[in-house]
Image (cartoon, rainbow, N blue to C red):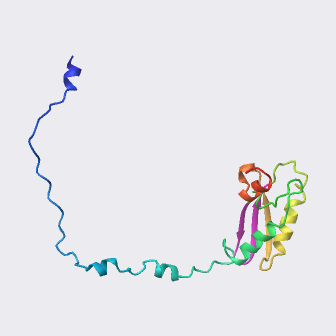
Amino acid sequence: MSMEADKRFDIEEVDGVTAPPRGRVDDAVEETAGETLARKKDYLEGFLAQQPAAASPGEPGGAVYERVIDALREIYDPEIPVNIYDLGLIYGVDVSDDGDVVITMTLTTPHCPVAESMPGEVEMRACAVPGVRDAEVNLVWDPPWGPNLMSDEARLELGML
């Protein structure tokens, strides 16, 4: 019975409540209707006029990096009609300032028929890119490749989207 007593509400009736005071701004700028409706200076004007900083050749967006990616997109898996980059076999491309490229990649399975030749072809294509001094391919199995690594373009090509 004591629990019910704790849950009770006391109700008090009142005739009225005074309104809270309104906020006031003493130093507000007075504008005419024309000034208020006139187009204000576009705040994006300065932002849109800025040019992006040039990317280093080895960074994503840099010339050498993008040419290496384009070269990798020319290599196709012999069993799947999709290039190895969009297939998700390339995990990383690192380009040093000296033009040394390190590509980390995997294959669809360790028993892939091109397991011996694919890393060599990737290295050869990367070395052929202008601006690349040397290329190294690291073949890894962790994390394992899966269809979730494919780009949307690859999924569309294979009818999986």
Per the image, is 92 magenta? yes
Up-down: is 120 above or below 17?
below
Q: Residue at 43% of width from left, 79% of height from top?
A: 42
Is 3 placed left or right of 91 in the picture? left
Up-down: is 110 above or below 82?
above
Q: Quadrant of residue 15?
A: top left
Is 3 placed left or right of 135 in the picture? left
Is 17 placed left or right of 28 in the picture? left
Per the image, is 152 magenta? no
**Picture coordinates of residue 41, whole percent (x, y):** 40, 81
Is 46 placed left or right of 149 in the picture? left
Up-down: is 149 above or below 16?
below
Q: Residue at 80% of width from left, 60% of height from top?
A: 84
Q: Residue at 83% of width from left, 67% of height from top?
A: 74
User: Residue pushed farthest top?
Assistant: 1
Write down the region rendered in magenta.
91-106
Quadrant for the N terminus, please.
top left
**Picture coordinates of residue 156, whole percent (x, y):** 76, 55
Q: Residue at 61% of width from left, 80% of height from top?
A: 54
Q: Main secondary structure of the magenta part?
A: strand
Up-down: is 112 above or below 48?
above
User: Residue pushed farthest front?
Assistant: 34
**For the image shown, how many numbered marks are present on the structure?**
0
Q: Is residue 146 visible?
A: no
Q: Is residue 117 visible?
A: yes
**Picture coordinates of residue 37, whole percent (x, y):** 33, 77
Q: Nearer the viewer, residue 8 or 65?
A: 8
**Picture coordinates of residue 2, whole percent (x, y):** 20, 19
User: Residue pushed farthest left?
Assistant: 15
